[in-house]
Image (tube, rainbow, N blue to C red):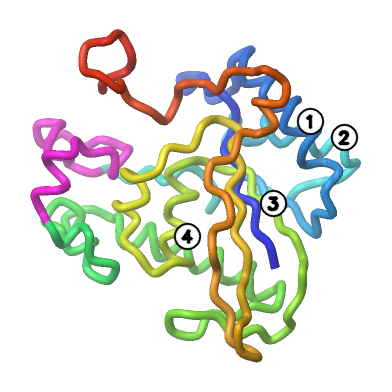
């Protein structure tokens, strides 16, 4: 099986929609995704994700399953850099804050960090991965401990139009690692495509492996520069986003 995790286009976060650039990116994305033999489409119920999926679905003549659990991973949390105030993005910490606590690197205990333990982060994470595993089970792959039973091995392709933070949650579950490592170690540009394949090296035992992370070849082929959203300044004070 092959999973496509597709980030929304360049966002207007205030209005939960796409910017004009994001709409152009979504059209270019459609030319790449619509011709693929997608078994099923799933889309976040947030506006920017649905607008991103629309050109692909229109071109392919398909519909998507709208899923609340694919919405961006937003849970009020008193991040250290927010002076104790609750902030709806729980994971976007400053490096000097999250790297000060090695437990955040632990794949099984990251949620025990003092800040996360006082929030609903673990419960929200568990709800997302339970829904994700339900979809995978419907397509023949059933979670069994830290791997999956390939009960109906297949080459189905599933497309998920969602968000960066949420994609990292799904990937951390598939790869059995702390989501903080992915939230801070990856940057996925708007409309980027992350490709994850199953590998069944012994009968009935499957794992997932990332073949491409944050691919934007559809933008490059059209001469469309990637949007900066999801990144921070390469050099402090150079005019790019620093917070």
Which residues lie in the magenta part?
Answer: 77-101
Q: Which residue is mark 1?
A: 55
**Residue 9 at x, y = what percent?**
60, 28
Q: Disc 2 or 4, which lies upstream in sequence?
A: 2
Q: Mark 4, residues whose alpha carbon is within 10 Å: few (<14), some, or many (≥20)?
A: many
- What is the number of the mark on residue 128? 4
Mark 1 is surrounded, within 10 Å at the Cα level, by few (under 14), some (14 to 19) or many (20 or more) other residues, namely many
Cα distance in 3D space between marks 3 and 2: 15 Å
Provide the residue designation for mark 3: 159
- Look at discs 2 and 4 and give the one toward the viewer: 2
What SS does tag 2 mark? helix
Q: Is residue 81 magenta?
A: yes
Farthest right residue in view: 61
In the image, is 77 to the left or to the right of 21?
Answer: left
Q: Quadrant of the C terminus?
A: top left
Say which residue appears at 50% left-offset and 85% top-offset: 144
- 128 above or below 67? below
Residue 176 pos. (x, y %): 39, 69
Mark 3 residue crowding within 10 angstroms, few (<14) / some (14–19) / many (20+): many
């Amino acid at each position: 099986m092959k999973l496509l995790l597709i980030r929304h286009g360049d966002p207007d976060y205030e209005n939960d929609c796409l910017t004009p650039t994001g709409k152009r990116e979504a059209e270019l994305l459609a030319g790449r995704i619509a011709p693929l033999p997608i078994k099923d489409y799933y889309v976040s119920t947030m506006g920017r994700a649905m607008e991103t999926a629309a050109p692909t679905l229109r071109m392919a003549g398909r519909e998507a399953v709208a899923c609340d659990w694919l919405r961006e991973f937003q849970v009020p949390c008193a991040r250290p850099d927010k002076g104790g105030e609750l902030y709806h993005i729980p994971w976007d910490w400053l490096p000097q804050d999250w790297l000060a606590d090695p437990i955040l690197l632990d794949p099984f205990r990251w949620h025990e960090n003092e800040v996360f333990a006082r929030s609903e982060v673990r419960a929200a994470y568990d709800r997302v991965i339970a829904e994700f595993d339900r979809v995978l089970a419907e397509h023949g792959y059933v979670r069994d401990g830290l791997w999956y039973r390939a009960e109906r091995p297949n080459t189905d392709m599933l497309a998920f139009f969602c968000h960066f933070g949420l994609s990292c949650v799904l990937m951390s579950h598939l790869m059995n690692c702390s989501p903080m490592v992915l939230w801070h170690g990856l940057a996925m540009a708007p409309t980027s495509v992350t490709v994850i394949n199953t590998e069944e090296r012994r009968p009935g035992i499957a794992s997932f492996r990332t073949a491409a992370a944050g691919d934007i070849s559809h933008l490059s082929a059209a001469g469309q520069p990637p949007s900066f959203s999801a990144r921070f300044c390469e050099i402090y004070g150079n005019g790019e986003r620093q917070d």
